[in-house]
Image (cartoon, rainbow, N blue to C red):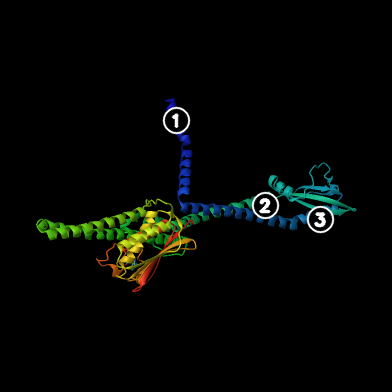
């Protein structure tokens, strides 16, 4: 019973503290998580600081002014009177306003009153100290009497003035407090308005998915840093959208490329099903066609896998130091064996040791030579040359083929891109060769370049850094 009463009593006593604690915690939380609240709080503290300073300056100014007036109107008269009767101070009748009069000789020993132990005070710190502790103003002055200097301290009670000064500061503080009723809502509304665009941005950003990837932030309105942020965000979204679209286009193009050979194979399988069992010619034709299509599909899938691996950064190169001349000689031999339709020239001027994956580098050079073969009519020239040029070893493949239009030149390294005139069935290709060559060359810190004149021929160069 006693315990419960004690507990209830304790709860009642602690209740106000609990409320204060809760308010403090909630304020701290808001301070931590809300920029608008932080801005409002900073302005609020600044406002209080200014009001306090204004109150202090106003009352100090009032006090200084009143004391000055008092010095001119009252004290100077008292000083004159004292000097006029000095040293017969016994005749002096102290005015009520004056709390005390002390006179010192040139060695600052008290002359009047004789029983005084007060020290001569003329510095501002002592004056201020007396003003605060005793609410008295000490006036000090020097006068000359009988060939000697005398010092005088007159103390006046300034209780009234101090009270007025305090009232003035109270008034200023009170008007500041009234001003706060207008100031706080205005400041908090302004800061929430200022932060509004960020809230808006957060909300819009939260809703962006691949389905509405074209959503952008509203950048109308003022030209401030937030607009710059929104603009930068929108530009980033533009890039992401473009990349996403390219990726989607690639997937759709790749599916399309695969759909054609599958349709062809299906067609031949149907043909085989109907007539192929008995008709040897149909059988032969179907087998050849299916073989070609499956080869082409395998080639396409391998290329697509290569690109996908490169995108995922899982493409591995087995790099080693190797002599490029050995590889170039191999390529020359192989090309001469495959291609009997063109006039082939091979000119390797220098040899070099290269650090790289020989299989991949050979694949990249082969892609250029295969293209030269594909896009150069019969009896045209194909020339492969290799030499050192400054920091790079250059492998150049030139042909006198159909060439590439200017508008296509910047696109031929894109995935699945084929120039208009080369999209015939006989020429073949999926538009992936140059993308792969570029991936390989860049993977070896090299460069790939192209020059071409439509109708005259093309010149592709691979530049690879070499060791010696
Ligand atoms: P493809 O498998 O179609 O050859 P590539 O990526 O290797 O794909 O080449 C892309 C396109 O660049 C080709 O379709 C062709 O239009 C053009 N091209 C590449 N090499 C040559 C060349 N030596 N002469 C003319 N056009 C070329």
Pointer 2 or 3: first along the chain? 3
How many angstroms separate mark 2 from mark 1 (CA)? 52 Å
Any atom of ligand 1 within 8 Å of the CB at mark 2?
Answer: no
Residue indicated by mark 1:
7
The image quarter in which residue 206 lies: bottom left
Residue indicated by mark 3:
80
Residue 81, image x and y in percent? 81, 54
Residue indicated by mark 2:
161
Would residue 211 be visible to someone looking at this image? yes
Pointer 2 or 1: first along the chain? 1
Residue at 45% across / 49% down in the picture?
33
Q: Quadrant of the N terminus?
A: top left
How many angstroms separate mark 3 from mark 1 (CA)? 74 Å
Is 208 left, or right, of 156 in this rendering?
left
Q: In the rendered view, would you say 308 is above or below 347?
A: above
Which mark lies nearer to you, 3 or 1?
Answer: 1
Is 406 left, or right, of 170 in this rendering?
left
Q: SS at mark 2?
A: helix
Is 68 left, or right, of 187 in this rendering?
right
Would residue 240 be visible to someone looking at this image? no
Residue 429, image x and y in percent? 29, 63
Q: SS at mark 3?
A: helix
Residue at 40% across / 61% down in the picture?
234
Q: Answer few, some or many: residues within 10 Å of disc 3's Cα (few below 14, many 20 plus, some between 14 and 19).
A: few
How many angstroms separate mark 2 from mark 3 (CA)? 24 Å
């Amino acid at each position: 019973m006693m315990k419960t009463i004690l507990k209830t009593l304790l709860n009642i006593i602690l209740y106000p503290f609990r409320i204060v604690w809760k308010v403090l915690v909630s304020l701290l939380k808001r301070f931590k998580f809300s920029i608008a609240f932080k801005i409002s709080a900073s302005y609020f503290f600044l406002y209080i600081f200014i009001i306090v300073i204004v109150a202090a300056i106003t009352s100090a100014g009032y006090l200084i002014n009143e004391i000055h007036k008092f010095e001119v109107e009252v004290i100077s008269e008292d000083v004159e009177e004292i000097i006029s009767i000095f040293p017969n101070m016994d005749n002096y009748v102290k005015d009520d306003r004056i709390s005390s009069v002390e006179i010192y000789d040139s060695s600052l020993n008290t002359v009047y009153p004789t029983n005084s132990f007060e020290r001569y005070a003329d510095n501002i710190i002592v004056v201020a100290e007396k003003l605060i502790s005793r609410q008295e103003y000490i006036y000090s002055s020097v006068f000359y009497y009988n060939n000697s200097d005398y010092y005088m301290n007159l103390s006046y009670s300034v209780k009234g003035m101090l009270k007025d000064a305090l009232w003035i500061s109270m008034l200023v503080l009170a008007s500041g407090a009234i001003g706060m009723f207008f100031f706080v809502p205005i400041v908090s509304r302004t800061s929430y308005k200022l932060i509004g665009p960020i809230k808006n941005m957060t909300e819009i950003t939260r809703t962006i998915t691949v389905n509405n990837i074209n959503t952008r932030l509203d950048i109308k309105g003022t030209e401030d840093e937030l607009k710059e942020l929104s603009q930068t965000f929108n530009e980033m979204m533009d890039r992401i959208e473009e990349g996403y679209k390219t990726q989607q286009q690639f997937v759709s193009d790749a599916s399309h490329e695969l759909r054609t050979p599958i349709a062809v194979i299906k067609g031949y399988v149907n043909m085989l099903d109907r007539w192929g069992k008995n008709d040897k010619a149909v059988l032969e034709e179907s087998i050849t066609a299916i073989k070609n299509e499956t080869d082409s599909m395998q080639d396409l899938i391998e290329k697509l896998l290569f690109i996908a691996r490169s995108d995922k950064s899982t493409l591995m190169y087995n790099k080693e130091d190797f002599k490029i001349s050995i590889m170039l000689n191999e390529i020359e031999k192989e090309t001469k064996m495959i291609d009997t339709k063109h006039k082939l020239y091979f000119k390797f001027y220098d040899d070099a040791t290269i650090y790289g994956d020989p299989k991949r580098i050979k694949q990249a050079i082969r892609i250029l030579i295969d293209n030269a073969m594909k896009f150069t009519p019969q009896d045209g020239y194909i020339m492969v040359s290799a030499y050192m040029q400054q920091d790079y070893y250059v492998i150049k493949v030139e042909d006198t083929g159909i060439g590439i239009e200017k508008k296509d030149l910047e696109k031929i390294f894109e995935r699945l891109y084929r120039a208009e005139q080369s999209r015939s069935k006989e020429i073949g290709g999926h538009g992936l060769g140059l993308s792969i060559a570029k991936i390989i060359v860049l993977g070896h810190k090299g460069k790939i370049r192209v020059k071409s004149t439509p109708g005259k021929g093309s010149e592709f160069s691979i530049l690879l850094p070499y060791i010696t």
